[in-house]
Image: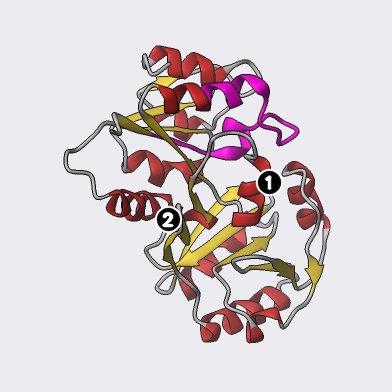
Amino acid sequence: MIKGIVFFDLDGTLLDKRSHLNTANREALFKLTENGYLPVVVTGRAPWEIRELTAGGDIHSYIGLNGQIVFNQKIVYQSTIEKEIIEEVVLLSNRLNHPLAFYGKETSKITAIDEAAVRLYQLDNAALPEIMPTFYRKEDVLMLYLFSKDEEKDQLYQTLFGNYLTIIRDTPFSVAMTAIGNSKKTGIKNLMNSLSLKESVPTYAFGDGNNDLPMFEAVDYRIAMGNGTDKIKKAADFVTKSNEDGGIIHGLHHLNLI
């Protein structure tokens, strides 16, 4: 019987600055399960990254690519972006010299590489995707990832594509684009529907970034990391310590979950 569900962002939250799941957090996940709680990862990361980064951490359910894919023992929800919309985004991003990454279910490719792309993948401790500008024409794309430090250009993308895509700047170097209406919030709703719970249970979320704000809207209790943004801290019920200072353990103890 599930007593509650705890949703965790990955980067800056469950993972340390090297993108590792440390021993203490790994043990906390097992303790949560032992105590009757279901731990779920909710992230902008892709499925293959989630599996690798949480290996050995008792994670069997996840929401990836900011709500575009939901896995609970099997894929229970998946959404792709229309190729016609992608084509238009590619044309604009090329004109503005903004690299654009295409995320499929099992791989990612990119149109070009610049400093913003390099900085983002360094931040995530991840390898740069292979350059393949026409990937989207042959393969389904679940999420677009735009690389740009030109925040003043964000509004142009929003104006042109806001009716077709959910657009969120998640770092100083990048902007995530999903199918319209999809977010970490809708991912949580789809995950909850897949559980078919007979009774409602309390839900909790740990996050550090502005792309975690939709996740906070979907749960009962919101915990911001000490290293989080001002916006996420303002939206939280409790601000724990940083991800480098035992913030997950401190927050779970505060909630009496472990």
Whether residues under marks 1 and 2 lie with C-beta atoms below 8 angstroms apart, the answer is no
Colouring: secondary structure
- Foreground residue among 147 and 78: 78
Q: Viewed as shown, does residue 22 lie left or right of 83?
A: right
Q: Secondary structure at mark 1?
A: helix
* Left or right: 97, with 77 as reference point: right
Q: Amino acid at mark 1?
A: Glu
- For residue 22, above or below residue 102: above
Q: Is residue 154 left or right of residue 101?
A: left
| Label 2 element class | loop
Instruction: Check disc 1: other Cα within 10 Å, few if <14, some if 14-19, many if 20+.
Output: few
Q: Residues within 10 Å of mark 2 (few under 14, many from 20)?
A: many
Residue 52, which numbered label? 1
Residue 162 in the image, given as x and y percentages of width and height = 44, 69
Q: How many marks?
A: 2
Q: Nearer the viewer, mark 1 or mark 2?
A: 1
- Quadrant location of the N terminus? top left
Q: Residue furthest left?
A: 199
**Sequence-earlier tag: 1 or 2:** 1
Query: Which image quadrant: the C terminus?
Result: top left
Q: Vertically, is 61 above or below 242? A: below
- Seen at 37% across and 17% down, the residue is 255
Horizontal and vertical percent position of residue 71: 46, 55
Three-letter code, disc 2: Ser
Q: Determine which of the numbered discs, if any, sits on residue 183 in the image.
A: 2
Task: Give the residues in magenta.
Answer: 6-29
